[in-house]
Image (cartoon, rainbow, N blue to C red):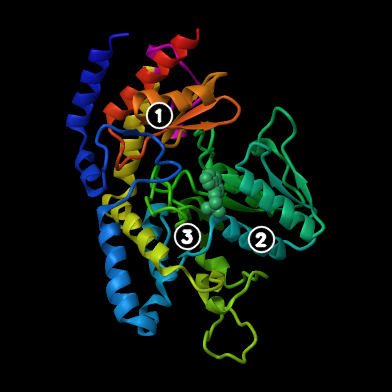
Amino acid sequence: MDVDAILAEATRLDGDDPLASQRDRFVIPDPDLAYLDGNSLGMTPRTTVHRIHEVMNDEWADGLIRSWAHWLDMPLTAGDELAPLIGANDGEVVVHDSTTINLHQLLHAAVALRPGSTHIAVDPGEFPTDRYAVAAVAAQHGLSVRNPSPGTSLDETDLNGCAAVVRSLVDYRSAAVADLIGFTKHAERAGTLVIWDLSHAVGAIEVDLPAASVDMAVGCTYKFLNGGPGAPGFSFVRAGLVEEVDHPIRGWFGQDDQFDMDADWRPKPGVGRLMIGTPSILSLEAARCGIAISAEVGAPALASKSRALTTFALDLVDRLGLLSDTDRDPHRRGAHVAVRHPDAEAINTALATSHNVVADYRRPDVVRLGCSPLTTRFVDVARAIVALRLEIDQRA
Ligand SMILES: Cc1ncc(COP(=O)(O)O)c(C=O)c1O
């Protein structure tokens, strides 16, 4: 392995990268850290640090309760700011609560829209929180949970009688991209609603929900959108469907006239009906700072950088004889690469302790290398894969 040549090649790619300067918009305490875990927690935008101080000093300390006048609608404002990244229109997205809560809420809504159904479907390899939400909501409605038969996928599953499917657009382990248009159509033919989980897609690949006639979606803002730890998730409901949406996870922020204190719950028009209780304004403001950078750069440029980084990564993986199931077609993968090895956990620990490379480990045998389009350098990718090879060789 010619490490110098690999690093020189990566340095040249960084030099040619039209998004290279975006990294300067983030706080970088250790320039030598190769951070490949922005798919779990994105880096800190400089604007966030400034904005959070501003909100604390000017809006909280000074403005006190008066600031709620403009804070009240912030989940909807943030939703409109995020919308272009998933092809959505104003009024179709709201940034609120955690992805898990949002999923529960939309699952209840989907089941209510499909009376007489017998089950909810989910892949057994789906992200745990999604499977838990499906199991819980199914149990509450007396429905069963169906998985695709062994050896098949949701794409081939008969969905007759199925109220809803929860499905990640980008698989959290392998980075495989599902067929958004094809699967949404397949479900629609059976009268089934799909709730797409965009957590590993938004800010990483191009997503056009209206083009695929998507009804509902949820996702995170703390991964590729760099919204900060615990930043609120988002919900999308197609404009033509949202007025039919009813759900039991209600609170006064979703009530049409929030300050009519004696009123029974009457939903706000549009996607605002999904708001629940008082939002965390500091987290929302942090999320907005991250969303703003991705929205300004735009999904096509972000996706193109993700593809370039993962293409380089997989090329090195193949050249250095590592094992990865991540799809070699750049349009069929998200912005991470999964490298497999039986000692993945120990190797991932060694990457951090001996090489200043932060990646992450997913059981049973995957080291995930997150390639965040705004912050990951080609040199980071090269260092991570060289380090992986060295660590694997030491264990041979
Ligand atoms: C696919 C997917 N869905 C949901 C979540 C998490 O949701 P929450 O923000 O509620 O913890 C994650 C977190 O990594 C995820 O990868």
Marks 2/1 in contact by CB < 8 Å: the verdict is no
- Which of marks 2 and 3 precedes in the sequence? 2
Q: Amino acid at mark 3?
A: Pro
Residue type at the position of mark 2: Ala
Crowd around label 3: few <14 · some 14–19 · many ≥20 (10 Å): many
Residue at 35% x, 24% y: name it. Answer: 355
Q: Which residue is mark 3?
A: 232
Mark 1, residue position: 352
Nearer to me, 122 or 339: 339
Give the labeled residue for mark 2. Answer: 110
Vertical position of residue 277 compared to residue 388: above or below? below
Which percent across, then down, holds residue 160? 75, 48
Bounds of the magenta segment? 317-332
* Membership of 321 in magenta stretch: yes
Residue farthest to the front, as pictured: 353
Quadrant the N terminus occupies: top left
Q: Badge 1, how many Cα within 10 Å: few under 14, some, many 20+?
A: some
- Quick one: 358 or 131, which is closer to the camera? 358
Between the residue at mark 3 and the residue at mark 1, the CA separation in whole angstroms equals 28 Å
